Image (cartoon, grey):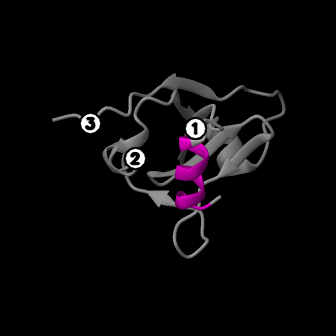
Amino acid sequence: MTLQEFAQAATAGHIQAIEVISLEGGFYVLQARLAEGLRPIRGEREQVLQLRSTTEVRAVLAEWASLPCELVQHCVHDEICASHPTAVAPLRVPLSLERRE
């Protein structure tokens, strides 16, 4: 889903929430939660949008600050070594999209 498609879906009320996935190396990627499942948000070149900070996340999503948003941090072991022998649920923290001054 491109950012433009995301905007159209959000305006139509199809976006249930936004997930900001924190990745190793200080990157964040966005996923839109819809009734049919999660969809990654892509940039203009159809590549998954990679953001460098929560400030940049807030700037990109400022227009949709009213949507529920969660910062999702997976287990570091899962990121580095694939999967953990015992499933560890990702940490989910509510993230406000309101701009910070």
Residue furthest right as drawn: 85
Residue, disc 2: 57
What is the number of callouts on the image?
3
Residue furthest front as drawn: 12
Q: Position of residue 67 (x, y in %)?
A: 49, 30
Amino acid found under the numbered disc labelled 1: Glu
> Residue visible at 72% across and 43% down?
38
First in sequence: mark 2 vs mark 3: 2
Q: Position of residue 12 (x, y in %)?
A: 60, 41
Given residues 51 and 74, the one toward you in this image is 51
Amino acid found under the numbered disc labelled 3: Arg
C-alpha separation, residue under disc 3 versus residue under disc 1: 17 Å
Q: Position of residue 31 (x, y in %)?
A: 62, 46
Residue, disc 3: 99
With respect to residue 58, does 2 lie above or below?
Answer: below
Is residue 39 toward the left or the right of residue 19 in the image? right
Q: Position of residue 72 (x, y in %)?
A: 57, 34
First in sequence: mark 2 vs mark 1: 1
Is residue 99 toward the left or the right of residue 60 in the image? left
Q: Which residues are magenta?
A: 2-11
Say which element carries label 2: helix
Residue, disc 1: 19
Q: Main secondary structure of the magenta part?
A: helix
C-alpha separation, residue under disc 2 versus residue under disc 1: 11 Å
